Amino acid sequence: MNRPARRFPLSLDRVTAAAASPSSAARPVVRPQRPVREAAHDAARTTRPVGQGLDSEAVRARMLDRLRAEGVDAPPVLAAMGRVPRDRFVDTAFVAQAYEDTSLPIGWEQTISKPIVVARMLALLTAGTGVRHRPIRTPLGRALEIGTGCGYQAAVLAQLASRVTSIERIGPLLDKARLNLAAVGCTDIRLVHGDGRLGHAPNAPYDSIVAAAGGESVPEAWLEQLAPGGRLVAPMHDEDADGQVLVVIDRTPDGLVRSLHDAVHFVPLKSGRL
């Protein structure tokens, strides 16, 4: 197995329980398969801070310049991130930090990933286009995201994939993502309230799978749902690194091929749903 040099640590800061949103006991009723477009009316009533320049293309352009300086060389990914307003996916208390290279709390002890983490993972995912053994219509084809979170990465994926299915185990967080996505016009993403370790078999197989939580090993269900020529990118524990690294898995005619990449720190991959 090839183990490329890890160029830099990509850390996702955890947040304490004190910073989390109210407990799941007070969560609203969740409709797992409710289309995002049904949340558009609610999103239209949502107000955001204005006058801070966060809606300026120049702000996003500066973020992209930083990503290029960090070594991200994936034009389709950078273009997609340039089209998605990250400030619409963070809480109002943190909106001024939306385009900084930092993770931010989104409630329920979860975080929105740093821009460099999103860029690096999706760059690895799109790099798999060159190893596909069948044609796909978009850089990522049919994509599955494990861990919707606030919906930001799903919105970027929607710029790169022909179809996006995103699964989240925390019901109130999924509701939050649904509103965020509707607010930016992403109404064709399939959102699922479920156990991410199981993937989502009804929409399988997937050309691309990306996970936003890390475990000890890649769940077998993800591998079973990966299409021939497909690529999976996920943070997983690595004993040699004494922590998490990004694992890339390609399904080739000769079987599964794995490689290890950058060191990262993601929230743990958990079973069940809340």
Image (cartoon, rainbow, N blue to C red):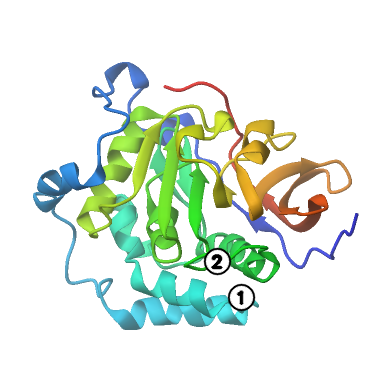
Residue placed most toward the observer, 75 or 163: 163
Q: Is residue 219 left or right of residue 107?
A: right
Quarter occupied by the C terminus: top left
Q: Looking at the image, is mark 2 or mark 1 earlier in the sequence? A: 1
State the image coordinates of residue 110 (x, y, percent, origin top left): 47, 39
Q: Which residue is mark 1?
A: 72
- Return the mark for residue 119: 2
State the image coordinates of residue 84 (x, y, percent, origin top left): 35, 67
Give the residue at x 41% y 29%.
170
Quadrant housing residue 149:
top left
Number of numbered tags placed on the structure image:
2
Quarter occupied by the N terminus: bottom right
Q: Residue furthest top?
A: 25
Helix, strand or loop at label 2? It is helix
Give the residue at x 53% y 64%.
136
State the image coordinates of residue 188 (x, y, percent, origin top left): 29, 52
What amino acid is at disc 2?
Ala
- Return the mark for residue 124: none
Give the residue at x 8% y 49%.
45
State the image coordinates of residue 117 (x, y, percent, origin top left): 58, 60
Q: Is residue 220 left or right of residue 75?
A: right
Helix, strand or loop at label 1? It is loop
Residue placed most toward the observer, 116 or 157: 157
CB atoms of marks 2 and 1 within 8 Å: yes
What amino acid is at disc 1?
Val
